[in-house]
Image (cartoon, rainbow, N blue to C red):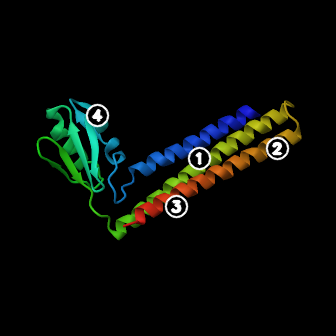
Amino acid sequence: MDEILLEAEERMEKAITALEREFGKLRTGRAHTSLVDNILVDYHGTPTPIKQLASVAIPDSRSITIQPWDKSAFGSVEKAIINSNLGLNPMNDGRLIRINIPMLTEERRKELVKMAKKYVEEAKVAVRNVRRDANEQIKKLEKSKDITEDESRNGQDEVQKLTDAYVAKSDERGAAKEAEIMAI
């Protein structure tokens, strides 16, 4: 029973971690390195993440600087950023690639909030799927007479408490992200 609960909690925590990762990809009005972390650059024919080709820094809240270690990668990095559909416009001065983060329009903010809500909902679905799996495992144990009916009911109650806690965590993170997106 404890194993089932531990595994369920672990999987629910992973759903929250995945939610945080998705939120990292959403562009708010501020610069942060996770905006460019997942952009793949065609480096000598191999798709390579920017963070493996260059040092990425945040000199101020409105800009990101990328300094490729290999001078020949400048063009590829710049092209990858332009093609990333993030609406970023890189400027290359030969030493650094600088990206200024433009202010978000009200319309774009609303789109981002919708995306954030979608990610929260996906996380909640993942948590509920974990609940279903855990409850099925508990019912199997009860059917095979490894645990009593009361233990089964208690186990399912514990799984429900975990589910409620992680759904609440998802909502909290979603509300915080929404506030961050809407802040000017």
Which of discs 2 and 4 lies nearer the camera? The answer is 2
Spatial distance from mark 3 to mark 2, Cα to Cα? 32 Å
**57 and 165: which one is in front?**
57
The kind of secondary structure element at disc 3 is helix
For label 2, the crowd category at 10 Å Cα-Cα, with few meaning under 14, some 14 to 19 and many 20 or more, is: some
Looking at the image, residue 137 sits to the left or right of residue 29; the answer is right
Q: Is residue 51 above or below residue 127?
A: above
Labels 4 and 1: the sequence-earlier one: 4
Which of discs 1 and 3 lies nearer the camera? The answer is 3
Residue 72 picture location, percent across and down: 14, 33
Residue at 22%, 32% in the rendered image: 43
**Residue 126, label in figure:** 1
Quadrant holding the C terminus: bottom left
Residue 90 picture location, percent across and down: 20, 50
Looking at the image, residue 141 sits to the left or right of residue 50; the answer is right
**Residue 47, label in figure:** 4
Image quadrant where residue 62 sits: bottom left
Q: Amino acid at mark 4?
A: Pro
Q: Is residue 109 above or below residue 164?
A: below
For label 3, the crowd category at 10 Å Cα-Cα, with few meaning under 14, some 14 to 19 and many 20 or more, is: some
Q: Amino acid at mark 3?
A: Ala
Residue 169 picture location, percent across and down: 59, 52
Q: Mark 3 sits on what residue?
A: 175
Q: Are marks 2 and 4 in contact (CB under 8 Å)?
A: no
The kind of secondary structure element at disc 4 is strand
For label 1, the crowd category at 10 Å Cα-Cα, with few meaning under 14, some 14 to 19 and many 20 or more, is: some
Q: Are marks 1 and 3 in contact (CB under 8 Å)?
A: no
Residue at 17%, 43% in the rendered image: 96
